[in-house]
Amino acid sequence: MIDLPSNNHAERPAGVAINTLVLHHTAQPLDVSLELLRFGQVSSHYLVDEEGDIYRLVDEDRVAWHAGLSWWGDRRSLNACSIGIEIVNLDGNCHAYPATQQAAVIGLCREILGRHPGILPRNVVAHSDIAPQRKDDPGIRFFWRELAAAGVGLWSDACATMPAGEIAANRLHVLLRRYGYPPPHCYGRKDGRFVYVDDPLDDISEVVAVGLQDIVAAFQRHYRPARVDGIADGETLARLCDVLYQAGESSD
């Protein structure tokens, strides 16, 4: 563990428990990533480089600025209740994560979960899970299966159990929401920052609509990376029902 404190952190709000672990890729090499996370306008609790070295940037009892505009379960703005790990990779949709780096991330995650038992397996999430359409990291080449095999998060290899198109859109929305994904929504900019759009618009500009297809694509990016098209085919539905079952939720 290499301690390189970041300037960017804040006090955790009173009464807010840590219940989410968010995994990111940096999209920058190590030196640029450290500069941004320590002296820019963002941060994370940890950074793991390609050689498996782990940099501790923000203490876990402090808020790091990694999630941005985010939504999971019943909570928005997840910085307050989460721990963030940045992983050096220029684009996890294109580049694999080296075995040494994978082992370091898995070990770090296991340690974090040991310190914070309130982080349920379903709450080990990608940045793309909590910010559909806006974010796509840590990418389709991330090692979710290996993490789950080590007891970190969930995974499913379930095969199709129903033909595509056999589930209504409103039912699909309910199941995704039940697992934790946000509902369809809009976001935009206000005073230079991303915000969710709630009526009235209140001078929000550059409004973007995040639809059900974007949220399905976010689920696929995590749990069915061989097909990320936002179309809920039979295998996507099977895996959604399977992780709901693993999380103790009904898919009825």
Image (cartoon, rainbow, N blue to C red):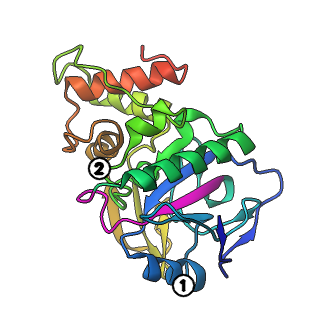
Query: Does residue 239 appear in this view?
Result: yes
Q: Name the residue type under label 1.
A: Gly
Q: Is residue 68 left or right of residue 186?
A: right
Q: Is residue 159 left or right of residue 99?
A: left
Which element carries disc 2, helix, strand or loop?
loop
Q: Nearer the viewer, residue 135 or 114?
A: 114
Q: Is residue 47 left or right of residue 101?
A: right
Q: Earlier in the sequence, mark 2 or mark 1?
A: 1
Up-down relation of residue 152 to residue 85 (above or below): above
Magenta stretch encompasses residue 92: yes
Q: How many residues crowd around disc 1 within 10 Å: few (fewer than 14), some, or many (20 or more)?
A: few
Magenta span: 82-95
Question: What percent of the width, then of the height, locates residue 207?
Answer: 35, 68
- Residue 141 image label: 2
Q: CA distance from mark 2 to mark 1?
A: 27 Å
Most distant residue in the right direction:
14
Residue positioned 40% across, 41% down in the render: 144
Q: Which residue is mark 1?
A: 40
Residue 60 location, quadrant: bottom right
Mark nearer the viewer, 2 or 1: 2
Q: Nearer the viewer, residue 20 or 175?
A: 20
Which quarter of the figure is the C terminus placed in? top left
